[in-house]
């Protein structure tokens, strides 16, 4: 990050407003245009300048482009963190700037409402098939409680929720995580997750579109990796778990919540399940072959389907919080 492009990027009132909005939540370019009462092409030009300066980052999800601030990230460059601090101080010290920022944030309520309405419409369209599937297995609440207990009481560190779907597991684990990265291949599901998670603190959850067979992350980035009712969609689960192992740090935990082996062929036909659950032998072999050391599985019986929770750990010693902080400072 260089100082001259950064200062040029900040030398515009609209871009200052955009940076303060992004400090509160990730927004689509169209949503920013709505809040700012400006045309989308004009907002896109401002967005490009902020991204070129290294203050923000674009991410494409289907036909939508979302923007997030990277200025205040703890692992980001010092100039970015200084910029985030400067803008927060400016809002506290400059009444005119503060009034404009507050007015912009009031418009975010309509964005949140629109997201929630879109999610409700999607749920209504698919409610019957989801209700049918839920009726076959253990209710969600006991499964979530059991998963939380299996993960223990310690901090979960940097969490990767693969196949986040509605974002429920990301929401459940966020209070115990440093940061949650919620990944899904479907833009529709990411929009639902975004509606669910939009009230969490900015920077707590990162929503990413991607495929679980080729995770868009560098090696050894996460302390906890989750697959909640996802792995049965994998044609080659060994490839998926190998990718999970690649992005997991030494000492990381992995949890797979999925069906025990069953013979409900209609799930393959109606719900696109590639696998009719997993036996303990299959799953423990998959985890071992991926380099994880498995724990004893946990079964939650349903009628007729049983949910299993398989947990494991990647060998090695996880870096301490202090050493991780030093690495982040060094990398910045």
Image (cartoon, rainbow, N blue to C red):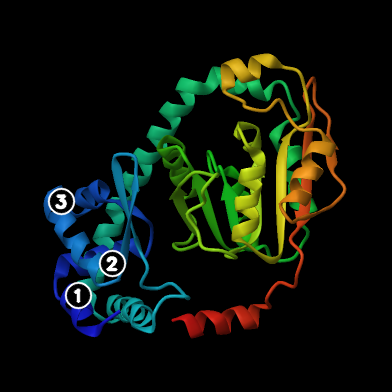
Which mark is first along the chain, 3 or 2?
A: 2
Under tag 1, what secondary structure?
A: helix
Between the C-alphas of marks 1 and 3, the distance is 19 Å
Above or below — where is 224 with respect to 321? above
Q: Which of pointers 2 and 3 indicates the residue nearer the eye?
A: 2
Q: Secondary structure at mark 2?
A: helix
The quarter of the picture where residue 137 lies is top right
In the rendered structure, the answer to whether residue 332 lies left or right of residue 300 reads: left
Q: Name the residue tied to disc 3.
A: 37
**Depicted 190 relative to depicted 160: above or below:** above
Query: Which residue carries the number 1 mark?
Result: 10
* Lower sequence index among marks 2 and 1: 1
Cβ atoms under marks 1 and 3 closer than 8 Å: no
Q: Which mark is residue 319?
A: none
Q: Is residue 171 visible?
A: no
Q: Residue 114 occupies which quadrant of the picture?
A: top left
Check the image and report above or below for 261 versus 252: above
Which residue is at a point 69% across and 21% down the rendered structure image? Answer: 135
Quarter holding the C terminus? Answer: bottom left
Q: Is residue 305 visible?
A: yes
Q: What residue would you read off at disc 2?
A: 19
Question: At numbered mark 3, what does the secondary structure look like: helix, strand or loop?
Answer: loop
**Viewer-closest of 116 and 84:** 84
Q: Give yes or no for contact between labels 2 and 1 (Cβ–Cβ under 8 Å).
A: yes
């Amino acid at each position: 990050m260089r100082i001259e492009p950064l200062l040029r990027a900040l030398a515009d009132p609209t871009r200052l407003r955009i940076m303060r909005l992004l400090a509160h939540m990730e927004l689509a370019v169209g949503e920013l245009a709505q809040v700012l009462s400006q045309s989308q092409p004009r907002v896109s030009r401002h967005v490009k300048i902020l991204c070129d300066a290294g203050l923000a980052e674009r991410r494409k999800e289907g036909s939508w482009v979302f923007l997030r601030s990277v200025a205040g990230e703890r692992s980001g460059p010092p100039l970015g963190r200084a910029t985030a601090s400067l803008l927060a101080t400016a809002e506290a010290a400059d009444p005119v700037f503060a009034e404009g920022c507050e007015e912009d944030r009031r418009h975010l309520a309509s964005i949140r409402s629109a997201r929630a309405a879109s999610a409700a419409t999607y749920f209504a369209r698919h409610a019957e098939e989801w209700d049918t599937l839920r009726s076959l297995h253990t209710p969600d609440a006991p499964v979530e409680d059991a998963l939380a207990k299996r993960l223990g009481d310690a901090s979960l560190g940097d969490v990767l929720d693969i196949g986040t779907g509605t974002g429920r597991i990301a929401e459940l684990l966020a209070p115990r995580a440093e940061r949650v990265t919620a990944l899904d291949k479907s833009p529709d599901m990411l929009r639902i997750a975004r509606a669910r998670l939009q009230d969490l603190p900015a920077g707590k959850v990162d929503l990413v579109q991607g495929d679980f067979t080729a995770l868009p992350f560098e090696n050894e980035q996460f302390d906890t990796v989750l697959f909640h009712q996802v792995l049965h969609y994998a044609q080659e689960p060994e490839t998926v778990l190998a990718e999970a192992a690649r992005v997991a740090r030494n000492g990381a935990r992995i949890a797979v919540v999925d069906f025990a082996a069953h013979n409900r062929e209609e799930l393959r036909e109606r719900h696109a399940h590639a696998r009719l659950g997993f036996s303990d032998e299959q799953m423990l072999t998959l985890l071992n072959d991926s380099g994880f050391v498995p724990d004893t599985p946990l079964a939650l019986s349903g009628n007729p389907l049983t949910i299993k929770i398989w947990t494991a750990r990647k060998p090695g010693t996880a870096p301490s919080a202090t050493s991780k902080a030093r690495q982040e400072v060094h990398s910045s």
